[in-house]
Amino acid sequence: MADHEESLMEKISEKLHGHDSSSSDSDNDKPSSSLKSKVFRLFGREKPVHQVLGGGKPADVFLWRNKKISAGALGVATSIWVLFELLEYHLLTLICHGLIVALAGIFLWSNASTFINKSPPRIPEVSVPEKQILQFASALTQEINQAISTLREIASGRDLKKFIIIIAGLWVFSSLGSCCNFLTLAYIAFVLLHTLPVLYEKYEDQVDSLSEKATIELKKHYKVFDAKVLSKIPRGPMKGKKNA
């Protein structure tokens, strides 16, 4: 009888320990799964940086997958900026001088080939691809129409947050435009595209952590600003009222 009671107590204790361990394991798994689902990513992205940049060769260039091509592209951009901005060379002058040198060289080579016993140069036939030009024009037209539609919706007064963001962005661009010309801005943007994505990919976790803290602080300040200022501004007519 005593042996039976001892075996019964052992089974009960084993079940209790097994239940505790399984519950503790499930409890330990829950925070990890919840943490994975709540990982903050900059700009709310869900894809790797390479896919966010569009994938393919352009993303490889921006992320320095092929260092020779990336360095070459950055070197060409730097040369163009130095040539036109620092040396104050003009685009039309450069095109004309380049055509003069190319035509003169090919002309002299073609006429001198009979005297130097060499075959004349093979001039390739170059033509503008109509299909690619039409595709680019169509894509550009869609983007312009989308931008015009967005500006029209913002100007109607239905989304005050977007209105403030667009006004602030335009003001920042206007301030930058007064400091430097378009070529310098394009060069700065090109250099940033060749540096920021690769640095972000390398220090992704640290940047996302700092961005999460900054986002939380900005949301707090925006709530205060919304309660004190934005909520008191009269809004434009809503879509439902307009259709009614």
Image (cartoon, rainbow, N blue to C red):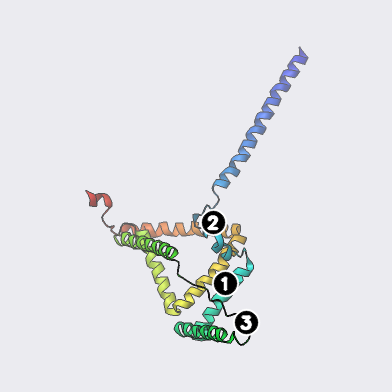
x and y, in percent, of residue 41 in the image: 53, 55
Q: 127 and 119: which one is in front?
A: 119
- Of labels 3 and 2, earlier in sequence is 2
Q: Which quarter of the rendering shows the N terminus?
A: top right
Q: Which residue is mark 3?
A: 118
x and y, in percent, of residue 203 in the image: 61, 61
**What type is the residue that disc 1 sits on?**
Ala
Q: 36 and 126: which one is in front?
A: 126
**What type is the residue that disc 3 sits on?**
Lys
Q: Which residue is mark 1?
A: 73
Q: Residues within 10 Å of mark 2 (few under 14, many from 20)?
A: few
User: Mark 1 touching mark 2, by CB under 8 A?
Assistant: no
Identified at 57% across, 73% down, the residue is 74
Identified at 43% across, 63% down, the residue is 131
Q: Is residue 122 above or below residue 8?
A: below
x and y, in percent, of residue 168 in the image: 40, 67
Q: Is residue 90 above or below residue 230?
A: below
Q: Which residue is mark 2?
A: 51
Calculate the distance from the C-alpha at mark 1 to the C-alpha at mark 2: 20 Å
**What type is the residue that disc 2 sits on?**
Gln
Q: 100 and 194: which one is in front?
A: 100
